[in-house]
Image: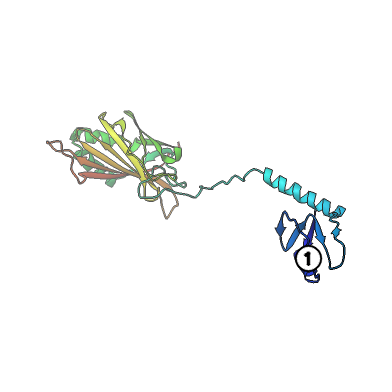
Amino acid sequence: MTKTDRNTVDSSVENMNVWNGTISTTNAEDGYVTVEKLTIQDEGSQCETLPTSTSAQESEEDELETDLETNDAQQPAPIVVIDTTDSVPNGPRWAICDSSIDLTGKWIVVTNSEWKKSYDVYLQALGISRIKRKLASSFISLLKEEVEQSEDGKEMLFRSINPKGSWERTFISSGALVESDDFQELHVDMKTGSGDYVKGESWWEQNGSVHHSWSRGAPTGDYEALRYMEKDNNTGEEFYVCESYFYKRDSNGIVSSTNSAMITWRFRRDGS
């Protein structure tokens, strides 16, 4: 088969008194028709069949086009990879933290005389006796906390260590993820520092920069905590901060809707 300019065929027809030939086509593109056999008859002449032989160059071009079409058909569909590196969950409550946040480390509490006064008031609100408060205040400067953050902040282990022993609890956050906004609240069994069994719930807020947790069900009341990193503008030193809130339970077992006491803990990295 050969490709013939459609205009050339039309022009040839117009110049003949009689057109009783036939054109068989299998494809038409870009103004060309593929001619298998062309028979024309001018007036007073015998029928003449025009040869449709293809040159060697045209054959090579046809074969090349066929090979390319075959190769294209055999090529697998491209794999589309969506980069979610910079994606973040929607909404105010996240199950994970921002990628720049990491509370992991060994920390030692920062205290001074004014802070110890606030600590005594906080313990008093928890119902701690004067003798026990004085004892606690005497060794509070030795308090250390270890934090292990894993699964993009979804799992947070906090281990408080003092001369009397250690207290460990693990929170598992529930909230929106990058791939889904739907979630169910998770409540994890754990103990308070005094040994009471509670249900722990947690999530990340403020664009994944603050870890928010609750410990509910203790006889004395419920506990709330906000944990985050804070930088000193003068020295550039980073501190691990924990805001602790206590909500007292009354004699009827009802927990107050407003906090009864609060204290802010600041920790610097333990260089020992």
Q: Position of residue 201 (x, y in %)?
A: 31, 38
User: Are there few (<14), some (14-19), or many (20+) residues within 10 Å of tag 1?
Assistant: some
Residue at the location (38% across, 39% down)? 108
In the depicted structure, whether residue 2 falls above or below residue 181: below
The one of 4 and 12 positioned closer to us in this rendering: 12
In the depicted structure, whether residue 102 falls above or below residue 20: above
The image quadrant that residue 34 belongs to is bottom right
Q: Position of residue 43 (x, y in %)?
A: 84, 68
- Which residue is denoted by mark 1 in the rendering? 19
The furthest residue to the front: 44
The one of 171 and 25 positioned closer to us in this rendering: 25
Q: Would you say 218 lies left or right of 24 here?
A: left
Indicate the amino acid at tag 1.
Trp
The image quadrant that residue 115 belongs to is top left
Q: Position of residue 192 (x, y in %)?
A: 28, 32
> What element does badge 1 sit on?
loop
